[in-house]
Amino acid sequence: MSIIISTLASEEWTKYRDIRIESLQNEPTAFLSSPEEEEKLDEQIWINNLKKSSNQQGFTLLFAKDGNQVIGMVAGFWGGREKIKHIAHIYGTYVNPAYRGKGVGRLLMQAVIDKFKSIPEVEKVKIEVNAQNISAFTLYQKMGFKIIGKAEKELKINGVYYDEILMEQFV
């Protein structure tokens, strides 16, 4: 197993779409979107996200690959309004179940944190995690994130509420 972390070219948009929909199907409590919502998205939206990421326009998408297979992803954004341009956000972190426990999540997280460290304006990184997702929560703590709060009933799926743990680290 030789895992690399990289971006995807816009021509590889189906790989991006497929791993994103896989993540929503496998971990519905970890994401705000549903597979049904994302399956309706037009091809151009997927392509534009990859282009936006490659152009460094305040948005990044990084993918974990084992050979030619995309096995994980992480997204992040930064910039924007003057008063909050020092804050970056990580979201959309996912690793295929067959690759969990093998350090892929750590590689993805380190890559996106390194990306944020390379942006002079970014001083702080924020992330939210479902309170029931102990493995992700533990990884984030090991990566230096500290708990700053808890948002109750943040997600509602099939009538069940889920809390989110709010975390941050300074870079």
Image (cartoon, rainbow, N blue to C red):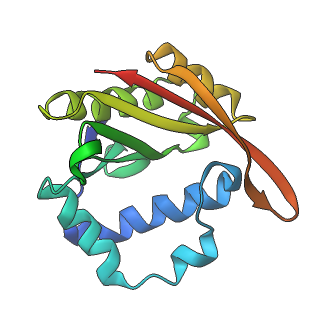
Tell which of 16 and 48 is nearer to you: 48
- Residue 93's place in the image compared with 138, above or below, is below
Tell which of 105 and 167 is nearer to you: 167
Q: Position of residue 68 (x, y in %)?
A: 31, 51
Instruction: Residue 2: tell me if it is visible.
Output: no
Q: Position of residue 142 (x, y in %)?
A: 50, 14
Name the residue furthest front. 83
Q: Position of residue 41 (x, y in %)?
A: 45, 81
| Number of on-image labels | 0
- Residue 100's place in the image compared with 21, above or below, is above
Q: Name the residue: 23% across, 27% down.
A: 114
Q: Position of residue 134 (x, y in %)?
A: 69, 27
Looking at the figure, which quarter contains the N terminus?
Answer: top left
Horizontally, residue 89 falls left or right of residue 171, namely: right
Horizontally, residue 165 falls left or right of residue 107, namely: right
Residue 168 falls in which quadrant of the image?
Answer: top left
Residue 166 falls in which quadrant of the image?
Answer: top right
Q: Name the residue: 47% across, 65% down.
A: 18
Horizontally, residue 142 falls left or right of residue 59, namely: right
Tell which of 40 and 16 is nearer to you: 40
Looking at the figure, which quarter contains the C terminus?
Answer: top left
Q: Name the residue: 32% across, 40% down.
A: 88
- Residue 45's place in the image compared with 168, above or below, is below
Name the residue furthest right. 159
Tell which of 125 and 99 is nearer to you: 125
Instruction: Residue 20: tell me if it is visible.
Output: yes
